[in-house]
């Protein structure tokens, strides 16, 4: 049996960040994961994740993104490892009402969020964008947002750095042991694992990603699990897609949610070489994370290339050097859940990053730790469970 002040269930993006922040606060914390993080079974893998501070999905996210950038830099100084690459972030919004992460108008909303938060950015004409980044072929009508301080983070490195720091600060970590049950205990919360380990804590944070709905039940019933695929393409000219010449990017080109894609420069020294490009699908849900098809068929790569890359990204060879699958936990409105359990006050639920969570995770982990410890009384309104999208789900 383990006794702790706080138990953190799930040690992906948000769980690792929360455990680290609890340990920084001097709290006796234990983190539990069914695998050995960082791993490739959930939503926090794939070598790179986009980061940006002018967050068009909603201005409630901006403080989390800005604080995350600060925390990544602090961790870099401590660990000596690069976690955050500010290679720039380009948004090409080719359809004003295009839906992206459950929100429309990603381009104009990003401009507004950046202006209101004082985030350095520029609005480019399509011609200016193509002069700056000759890899891209625009049609001439697009709204183009560029954020020089945006770019990418390395998710596996970020998770590992925070878990190592948490352990140095006294946190205990249990891996390769699935949580089977979470229930109220005599003095807080009792967590039971599949190996028979019992953890008694004053409070708990459940941030198990795609496993959350199965653990929590009704409060997270509206969440959908969606398989997504990632593809690494070979450039004809590697230098054209190197950081400094190629930013991370998001591109919408139609009104329907699937008419968008995103990608990254080719990062030297990565095990999976190439220009990583992915799209998102919101229709084919899976019943459980175990049901995900991990193999990515070449036909999926061919379909992505034909629908999104061809005619827009110059000098990329069709056919993937590598491909991988991951899972999104998607809320109906595309927003997060960071709130207390409606029946068990000592449990904080963290779920549904809806495909845009990693860039916020370090700052959100700090917020979640403070919320769990009672230093923050009220959750962010946009992330409450008692919001219309979840009530009607």
Image (cartoon, helix red, strand yellow):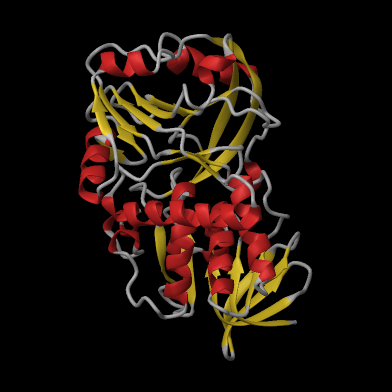
What percent of the width, then of the height, locates residue 87?
A: 46, 33
Task: Please tell me whether residue 80 is drawn above or below residue 297 in the rendered image.
Answer: below
Residue 378 versus residue 329 in the image, above or below: below
From the viewer's perspective, tell me whether residue 58 is left or right of residue 279: left
Q: Residue at x 44, y 15 (%)?
A: 307
In the shown orientation, is residue 134 left or right of residue 240? left
The residue that appears at 42% across and 54% down in the rendered structure is 222
Rendered image quadrant of residue 8 = bottom right
Q: Which of 110 and 333 is in front in this view?
A: 110
Image-quadrant location for residue 191? bottom right
- The N terminus sits in image quarter: bottom right
Farthest bottom residue?
A: 186
- Locate residue 176, reporting x and y percent: 76, 59
| Residue 149 visible in the snapshot | yes
Tally of numbered tags? 0
User: Where residue 80 sits: x, y (%)?
Assistant: 64, 51
Q: Which of 220 and 323 is in front in this view?
A: 323
Residue 181 lies, in percent from the top left, at 64, 71
* Residue 11 seen anywhere in this rendered image of the structure: no
Tell me the residue at 51%/63% (across/down).
Answer: 217
């Amino acid at each position: 049996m383990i006794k702790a002040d706080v138990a953190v269930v799930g040690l992906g993006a948000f769980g690792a960040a929360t455990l680290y922040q609890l340990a920084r606060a001097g709290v006796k914390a234990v983190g539990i994961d069914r695998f050995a993080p960082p791993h490739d079974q959930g939503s926090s893998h794939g070598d790179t994740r986009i980061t940006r501070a002018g967050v068009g999905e909603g201005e409630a996210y901006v403080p989390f993104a800005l604080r995350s950038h600060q925390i990544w830099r602090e961790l870099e100084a401590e660990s000596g490892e690069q976690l955050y690459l500010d290679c720039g972030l380009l948004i090409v919004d080719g359809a004003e009402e295009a839906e992206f992460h459950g929100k429309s108008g990603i381009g104009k909303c990003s401009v507004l969020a950046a202006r209101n938060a004082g985030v350095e950015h520029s609005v480019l004409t399509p011609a200016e964008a193509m002069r700056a980044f000759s890899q891209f072929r625009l049609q001439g009508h697009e709204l183009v947002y560029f954020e020089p301080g945006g770019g990418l983070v390395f998710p596996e490195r970020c998770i590992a750095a925070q878990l190592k720091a948490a352990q140095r600060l006294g946190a205990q970590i249990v891996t390769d042991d699935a949580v089977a049950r979470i229930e109220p205990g005599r003095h807080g919360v009792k967590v039971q694992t599949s190996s028979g380990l019992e953890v008694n804590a004053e409070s708990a944070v459940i941030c198990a990603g795609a496993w959350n709905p199965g653990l929590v039940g009704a409060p997270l019933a509206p969440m959908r699990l969606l398989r997504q695929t990632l593809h690494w393409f070979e450039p004809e000219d590697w230098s054209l897609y190197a950081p400094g010449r190629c930013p991370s990017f998001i591109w919408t080109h139609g009104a329907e949610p699937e008419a968008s894609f995103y990608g990254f420069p080719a990062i030297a020294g990565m095990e999976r070489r190439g220009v990583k490009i992915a799209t998102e699908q919101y229709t084919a849900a899976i019943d459980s994370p175990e049901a995900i098809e991990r193999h990515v068929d070449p036909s999926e790569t061919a379909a992505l290339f034909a629908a999104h890359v061809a005619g827009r990204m110059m000098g990329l060879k069709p056919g993937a050097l590598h491909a991988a699958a991951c899972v999104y936990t998607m809320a109906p409105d595309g927003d997060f859940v960071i709130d207390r359990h409606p029946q068990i006050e000592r449990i904080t639920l963290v779920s549904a990053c809806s495909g845009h969570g990693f860039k916020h995770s370090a700052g959100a982990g700090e917020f979640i730790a403070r919320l769990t410890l009672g230093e923050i009384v009220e959750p962010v309104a946009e992330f409450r469970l008692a919001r219309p999208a979840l009530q009607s789900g």
